[in-house]
Amino acid sequence: MIDATTKNAIEIKDLTKRFADVTAVDSLSINVTSGSIFGFLGPNGSGKSTVIRMLCGLLLPTSGTATVNGFDVIKEPESVKQSIGYMNQAFSLYKDLTVDENMTFFGRIYGLQGERLEARKNAVTDLVGIRGYLDRRSGQLSGGWKQRLALAVALIHEPQIVFLDEPTAGIDPVARRDLWDLLFELADAGKTLFVTTHYMDEAERCSDIAYIYMSKLMVHGTPNELKAIDEVTPEGLKRVSVASSQPSHALSALKSQSFTKDATLVEAEVHLLLPEETPDATIVSALKDKGVEDATVRPVEASLEDVFVSLTRKLEKR
Amino acid sequence: MKGLLSGFTAIAAKEFLHMKRDPATIVIALFIPMLQLVLLGYALNFDVKHVKTAVVDLSRTSESRTYIQGLNNTQNLDIVSYLPSPDQAELALRRAEVSVAVIIPPDFDRHFGTSQPPTVQVYVDGSDGQVARPAITAFAGPPGAARSGGVQARYSVLYNPQIRTQVYTIPALVCVLLQLITVSLTSFSLVREREQGTLDQLMVSPVGRLGLTLGKLAPYSVLGMIELFVVLALGCTIFDISIAGNVLLLALFAVPFIMAGLSVGLLISTIAQNQAQALQLTMLTVMPSILLSGYISPRDTLPGALYLLSEFIPVTHFIAISRGIVVRGAGFTDLLPSALALCGLSVVLITAATLRFRKSGA
């Protein structure tokens, strides 16, 4: 049974998966705290999906162990499956069934029936707010509503952990924000959410983040912990933001400067990594020489994107 | 003209690349005609010889033995059993163990050299005209060994006296069509789930493998059963065929046949990656089974290996059952061997589909 006092919803120890001669996941060890929104990040092909498939009891690890809700994924895959919810990046419900029929089907698959099934359907219907669409064929819903339905289905059997594999891929910004509001609500209610995403603003919303690259765990911590790690802003360097009326021109001008270690455009400003001792005036005058007259400089902290870009570049150089 | 042909080389080159990237399709496309050639070459044999024949020798004299030997030497008939009584011979005919029965009367030897030539009674099973016609020719045709020594054969065709083609083709055609429907119904269902991603959603749930397999089969088997009777009723009405046996018995024996067909479909859908491959594999399995099942030409004409193979094809047994019930009025015990074979095949196929499903899902 699910132990309410279990501190870690998921415990992963030395988890490894090899396919023939390819190592897809290389001795991964992470704990996921109960009630957290755990952001699982990494480039495509880094092994994220393989980890999720192992945690969901779909794929046997080559070595190592993992427990989900206290159930061993190798020894008790069926108990794992009963205790988790799963929401895929692609809409993976029956398009020719109505919203209501999809919920009924998956509820029954998880062993719900009668009044209990009705009660759960009502609960998740209200949670995601899809009551107005119950009789609509799910294939006719818009992207955002499809994802809400997928979340409702993932929650129908009251799982303690929900795996969300790129839940917001391909939906509009408003629907994206609504879905995240729902996720916060769920986390407040004590559910553990295991989320993969490529959106940095979504990563910022997670309570914990793990970043995997080339089958290995690179970093793990809260967003603020990650921004503070040494490799991101190495000793002797600082990060500043340069605002001007000609941002793209300013970017190319700054990229050619000898003091520039890294430069990128963020929200119409140039984010710059450069030696700590470089005065702001040097940047402003360098830009003036290139015809950018109105530049202003302010210090800025590393973003999560900076964290992942600098970690990935550093590893690629090896 | 330039406008009409523009892009021709680019399209052709792109299509060639598609072919290169999907070698499975090419292999199947090349393999199907080769298989068809071999199967059609061997299986489409309308020169029916060696018709299975039973002899009831009530005379037991040297004359009758010489006559029997003469029958066997014709190559048209194969004496496969000696039976003690005409009743036994009729049972063997109803069970399709033999297609011809020759009854030699007790006074057979006494008629030699008299004004009344010796006469034998011949029963021919009319439930497969392709067997019945050459069998009759062997006795009634112009001089042949079967008439040697001035022996007259009085033949009667049982079950389908006029040897009307539809009487024996329609009951078999119904089986073939039912097979086509059952295999294709399910072969698309799992592939569609894989293509739509719903298979993943099912796999992360605690649904049981057998629950999934049987749950998929159940609704389609109801559809298959309805299909069987609608098509059979239509066929019998249009072609004026009266069903000699018990229709409920046909329904009972249709259950394992429908399950077997649906399981073949499921098995295909665990192998095929997309709907096009599912269609190809369906054709690949359905087509040989039509050729080997005895629907097009009698199974007795098949060479040994193919004959053995045809025993493992569900529709072979169901055609035997269907013709048995519809044409010959065969009963439960008459058809039990075919029914048991069908049950065995369907259990094996359901098991195989369930096991394959576990693998393909992981």
Image (spheres, coloured by chain):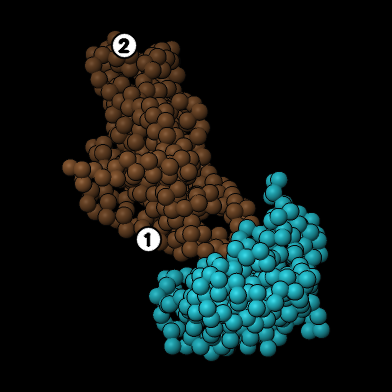
Chain colours: A cyan, B brown
Image coordinates for residue A104, horizontal then vertical, percent: 52, 78
Label pair 2/1, CB-CB below 8 angstroms: no
**Vertical placement of residue B328 versus B131, above or below:** below
The image quarter in which residue A55 lies: bottom right
Relative placement, left or right, of A264 versus B167 is: right
Tell me the residue that label 2 is attached to: B149
* CA separation in Å, label 2 and label 1: 55 Å
A16 or B218: nearer the viewer: A16
- Amino acid at the residue labelled 1: Ile
Label 1: element kind = helix
Label 2: element kind = helix
Q: Is residue B114 visible?
A: yes
Q: Residue at x 34, y 44 (%)?
A: B11
Which quarter of the image is occupied by the N terminus of chain A? Answer: bottom right
Image coordinates for residue A221, horizontal then vertical, percent: 76, 75
**Vertical placement of residue B325 versus A240, above or below:** above
Tell me the residue that label 1 is attached to: B226
Between circles 2 and 1, the one closer to the viewer is 1
